[in-house]
Image (tube, helix red, strand yellow):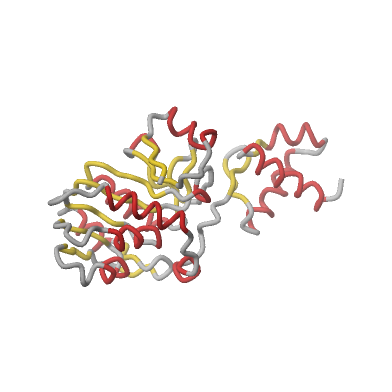
Amino acid sequence: MLTSYRKQQLLTRLKQDGKLVAKELSEELGVSEDTIRRDLRELAQDGLLLRVHGGALPASPAMGDFAAREEIRHEGKVAIGRAAAAMVQQGQVIILDGGTTSREIARHLPHELKATVVTHSPTIALELLYHPSLEVILLGGRLFKHSVVAVGAACLEGIKAIRADIFFMGVTGVHPQTGLTTGDFEEAGVKRALSHAAAETYVLASAEKLNAASPFKVLELSQVTGIITEAHVSDAMIRPYKKLGIHAVRA
């Protein structure tokens, strides 16, 4: 079997099943597990999947940098931002993660809302600059230019002083088995600390992030309150999360 044809079969199966198991594929395709692992390694190098122990998972398509993601303002992100903003109550302390979906939350916070917003994203802080009734706390640290957020020791130290009501978290991967993941080790640590600083955590999960994975773990799904996703996401796609007791909001 030609390598290119075999790789295409692997990608087709990954799209259908949401995962690949090297041992099963070896038996089915009549090749060694070493051959399958080599195929998976090469596909991972091309960014087409994420290798995990024993096989592979879909790679998140949301791994582009902020400038690339900024070009895409699809209605799903707008709807998620609107739904999340409607959850905020007067007088609350909320944490907004960085990212383009979080920016939609900032844009949809009611004009009359009196609350405190904590963020490690200069972009989010600037979005709220002219909101008349919001107190904005901007956490500092080393600027991670890929996502335009602060990370590192100074940021983590600042988070220790925060006790928030709700954190709206952005990630690049949401998967029933691997949990919440993102593309940078330090950024994952900051997201984890922000979640621990909030009474509730809701994950902003546009459709392309569901059942996808990235290299660095943030949290188990059991550690968050719920996910906010798009209205068109199917019941079948949502079902595994509901089984885990995750509150799913469709915007």
Asked whether 14 or 238 is in front, the reply is 238
Q: Residue 22 appears at what percent x and percent y?
A: 68, 37
Q: Name the side, left or right, on which 61 lies relative to 81.
A: right
Q: Residue at x 46, y 64 (%)?
A: 73
Q: Name the side, left or right, on which 6 lies relative to 164.
A: right
Q: Residue 72 appears at what percent x and percent y?
A: 49, 65
Where 86 sits versus 70, above or below? above
Where 174 sits versus 126, above or below? above
Q: Quadrant of the N terminus?
A: top right
Q: Residue 102 appears at what percent x and percent y?
A: 35, 58
Q: Residue at x 46, y 57 (%)?
A: 75
Q: Residue at x 28, y 69 (%)?
A: 127
Asked whether 149 or 115 is in front, the reply is 115
Indicate the quadrant where residue 66 lies. bottom left
Numbered marks: total: 0
Q: Residue at x 48, y 40 (%)?
A: 178
Asked whether 119 or 52 is in front, the reply is 119
Q: Residue 239 appears at what percent x and percent y?
A: 49, 31
Where 165 sits versus 126, above or below? above
Q: Residue furthest right?
A: 1
Q: Name the side, left or right, on which 121 lies relative to 21.
A: left
Where 75 sits versus 245, above or below? below
